[in-house]
Amino acid sequence: MSIQPFDKYLTRALGLFVFLAFLSPVFFWPTFYAPFSSLTLISFFFCVEIALPCYLLLLSQKKHPFDAFHHPVIRAIALLMLVMILSSFVGVDPLNSFLGTIDRPVSVLVYIHGFLLLLYTLELFSRDGRWKTRISLLIISIASVIALYTFGEGWLWPTFVTFEGRTASLLGSPNYLASFLILPTFLSIAYASNVHKKMRPIFWMLALSMVIAIVLSGTRGALLGLIVGALILVTPSSSPLKRGRTGGLGTRVSKRMLLAGLLTFLGVFLVFSVTNVNSLMERFTQTTDANSSMRLVYWNMAVEGWKEHSFLGVGPGNFYTIADPAFTPDLYQHTHAWPDSPHSTLFERLSTTGLFGLFAWFLFLFFLMRALWQHRTQPANIALLAGIIAYLVQGLFFFDGISDFILFLFVIAWTCTSTPSTTHQEHRSPSFLLGGAGGVLALTGIFFLILPLRTEVALAGKQLLPQQQIIIDDLLISQTAFERATTLNTTQDPAHVQEAIDLYVESLDRHPLRQQAWNDLAWLYYIQAFLQQTIVSEEGILSAQRAIQLAPGRIEATSTLTQMLLHTATIASEQQQYPLLIETYLSLIELQPTTYSYLANLATSYALNGQIEEAITTANTLKHLDPQSTESVNAFLESL
């Protein structure tokens, strides 16, 4: 009995940290150039780390501390985690797979923290079921605030990001907004089926506000997911929906869904009156736009990349190693981006974790949906099942974000505790040794992961660089240095260029397959040579060539190398280094054989270097390839 007060305080502390972890999606950082996800990720990491000692102390009290692993869903997730870890080790960029980046938080490290949060939540629910209600209402409240923000975005309160008439609310992207709101929409519907009759309209209206926000986001995949989820709710074949007054959704659901659909139409019509109607309607009705075309291209890239790494893929977060060499010049009519995701959770798992990862993912989904279906007598489970399917449908057209990933963890915890356990759990005195070990791990995570990452993000927003030995997101730091080095005031402080070069060299030592980083490094070498009025260093030329080698179809590295060679030619000509001038023009001709002015300059260079025969041969070649140059070539030959 003496351990009960301590147990109570530990449970409250764990509940607080879990509560804050699920609150983290509303934390955003608008001063950072890649906002909204950065602070959410850091807060998520912090809450999970600091809750670890509490969880381990509570776990040490249990006679059977690993009873959560008896559930097949948890076992399937553990298997998925093992496959991801194995895939990261044998993949093409293990460090990127494990740490990830602030822009694409799909790393093994994120999933480990997510798995811990899931275990925390299960332990919390098993000790005090009221936390399940509290966190459910928290998620619904968060989603409602985010949804309602869209209604006045741009005219009642600030718009943080503009997307051609599409709303993004507090999440920084219309796609993130839509994918985030899908699960809370169906969670609100689940609550509408369980609460007192007087409270039901509130939850229906909250769900309706989220649906309208999804429509205003202009996200077609999410809208398709909503439609599929709604069909599951109202389909006559779903026997639990016919139970009338026994606590189920009953035939009332069909009527309510029809009413909700009518109210949605009216609400969207009213909101459209103050927004850009044409752009949204055009987006919903058009299937041949650049985004749709590029998704098909990305999916094809993923399949082709999977064929070369069939079983374990290229590693989580390493899709860029597939997309860079597969990029072709004709794709520039649709995008100039460096793809780092196939914009589909299905194809991303296939290409990055292979057949083993895809099998583990399907196995997890099977047990998850089976658990809800087995307890379909509870109407909330049917609503959540529809929500999961809607979420998976939209995931076919988009990748996971950190905010919706956190919400998905809650749905998993809800599913694993959909029927209260009747097993009595014997408790014993807590192991302070285990709790102390958890404290050490938490402090290690805070000081060696969270604080360095927080510093990197905060300084990046100010275009400053951290002065620390521990680097978590070296891509973020090197890109920040690149922006500093390429601003207009660079000529006043060329040291920024050398600083950026050093950081890129260190980053590429860790991630040698990042084509974009090689191109940035080559451009920095060019800027350095331009500022110093010297020829481009050999390292710069090799950087550009490496970038071309990694992505032959991209024009950026070819353009950078061309600029380098032209600059070198200018310096060589001014310094009368004719052998170097000849070598440079030969490289330019090899790089761009249809630019005939290079042939003319090469002929002149030969003549200046006293190689008359080579000059004549080159001039005649120019005359043959470009008949319009005959007159000028003849004049040149006569001058010899």
Image (cartoon, helix red, strand yellow):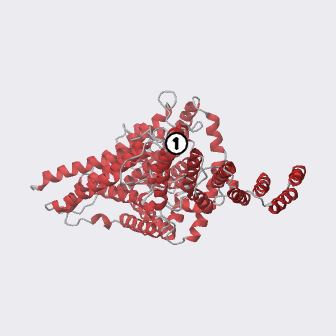
Residue 395's x, y, as percent? 52, 54
Given the current orientation, which residue lies at the most extreme left position?
A: 2
Viewport quadrant of the C terminus: bottom right
Which quadrant of the view contains residue 270? top right
Q: Nearer the viewer, residue 450 or 521?
A: 521
Q: Which residue is drawn at 60% across and 53% down?
A: 536
Looking at the image, residue 258 lies above or below residue 576? above
| Side of 134 where 145 appears, left or right | right
The secondary structure type at the circle numbered 1 is helix
Q: Which of 334 and 231 is in front in this view?
A: 334
Given the current orientation, which residue lies at the most extreme top position?
A: 156
Which quadrant of the view contains residue 608? bottom right
Q: Which residue is drawn at 71% across and 56% down?
A: 578
Observer able to see residue 417: no
Residue 268's x, y, as percent? 55, 35
How many numbered dots are placed on residues in this image?
Answer: 1
Mark 1 nearby-residue class (10 Å; few <14, some 14–19, many ≥20): many
Residue 198's x, y, as percent? 36, 36
Q: Which of 246 and 616 is in front in this view?
A: 616
Residue 325's x, y, as percent? 61, 62
Q: Which residue is drawn at 62% across and 34% down?
A: 277
Given the current orientation, which residue lies at the most extreme front position?
A: 610
| Side of 63 where 75 appears, left or right | right
Viewport quadrant of the N terminus: bottom left
Q: Residue at x 34, y 54 (%)?
A: 449
Residue flagged by tag 1: what amino acid is it? Ile
Q: Which of 445 and 635 is in front in this view?
A: 635
Observer able to see residue 370: yes
Q: Mark 1 points at which residue?
A: 214
Looking at the image, residue 434 lies above or below residue 262? below
| Side of 4 where 456 appears, left or right | right
Which quadrant of the view contains residue 219? top right
